[in-house]
Every structure is written in C-alpha cells, then in structure tokens.
Image (spheres, grey):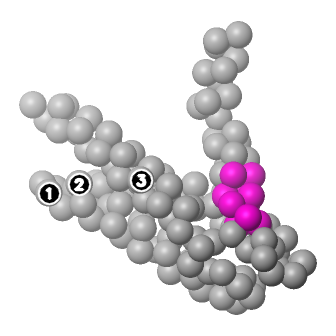
C-alpha cells in the first residue's frame, strides 16, 4: 500500500491532474459571483494553465539554476520562473475574459512560486553539497 502511495506521489501525471483540479477549482470559486459561464471558463483556463505551469516551473528552474552561482543561484531561478508565470497568467486570463484576474491568480501564483523556490533551494543545496 505504501509503495503505491509513493508511486502516486512521484507521478508527474498525478501532479499535473492535481494542479488542474485544485487550481481550476480555486478559479471557479474566485469567480463564483459572476454569471455562468465566466466562472467555468476561468476554472478550465486556470486548471489548464496550472497543469502546464507545473511542468514549466520544474524545467525552467532546472535550466536556470545551472546558469547562476552564489546568491543569484538561490534567488534568480524562482524569480524568473515567477515572472514568466505571472505574465502568462495575466495575459491568458485577460484574453479569455476572466472577471477576477487578481483573485484568480493569487493562490496559484503563491503556490507555484513557493514550489519553485523550495525546489530551487533543494537542487541548489544538493549542488553545494556535491561541491564540498
């Protein structure tokens, strides 16, 4: 049973599906006071973006962390990934007509930036330990 849970926890498909459901659900909630179909569209758009950003963040942080050293290695990869995510979220939600853009992206952006920072720290720390 534990092995199955570990397998699910490490599955990229599970991470992407969870991001879609959790953040799409948040967008639906954040836009609930607007007439249908606006909340539904916002939910599908945010769910899709969150699923794609889950893949983007890991790839971006991996690539950027190799390009910097010192303090820049800890700060710049998650910052650049956060700025890229922010731009994509705002532009795509504006284009799709999401009424509550800031409310819609606040939670997903906070979660994804925290993930990027923690992931970057973990791989930067591993590189630091290997260089000792």
Q: Could you tell me if residue 83 is visible in this image?
A: yes
**Residue that mark 1 sits on:** 71
Q: In this view, does 78 lie to the left or right of 32?
A: left
Residue 101 on image: x %, y %: 62, 80
Q: How crowded is mark 2: few (under 14 residues within 10 Å), some or many (20 or more)?
A: many
How many marks overall?
3
State left or right for residue 90 relative to residue 63.
Answer: right
Q: Look at the image and tell me whether residue 47 can be seen.
A: no
Q: Is mark 1 on a helix, strand or loop?
A: helix
Q: Residue at x 18, y 61 (%)?
A: 72
10 Å crowding of disc 3: few (<14), some (14-19), many (20+): some
Q: Which residue is drawn at 47% across and 60% down?
A: 110
- Please report the bounds of the magenta region as a residue range: 20-29
Image spot of residue 104 (x, y percent):
63, 72
The disc at residue 114 is 3
Q: Which residue lies furthest to the top in this view?
A: 1
Residue at image x 59%, y 31%? 10
The tag on residue 74 is 2
Q: Residue at x 9, y 31 (%)?
A: 132
Q: Determine the CA span between mark 1 and mark 3.
A: 17 Å
**Disc ID at residue 7:** none
């Amino acid at each position: 049973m534990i092995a199955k849970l570990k397998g699910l926890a490490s599955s990229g498909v599970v991470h992407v599906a969870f991001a879609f459901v959790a953040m799409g659900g948040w967008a639906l909630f954040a836009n609930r006071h607007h007439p249908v179909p606006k909340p539904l569209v916002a939910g599908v758009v945010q769910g899709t973006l969150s699923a794609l950003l889950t893949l983007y963040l890991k790839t971006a942080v991996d690539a950027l962390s190799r390009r910097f050293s010192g303090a820049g290695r800890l700060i710049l990869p998650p910052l650049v990934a956060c700025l890229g995510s922010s731009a994509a979220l705002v532009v795509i939600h504006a284009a799709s007509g999401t009424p509550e853009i800031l409310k819609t992206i606040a939670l997903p952006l906070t979660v994804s930036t925290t993930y990027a920072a923690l992931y970057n720290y973990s791989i930067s720390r591993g590189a630091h330990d290997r260089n000792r």
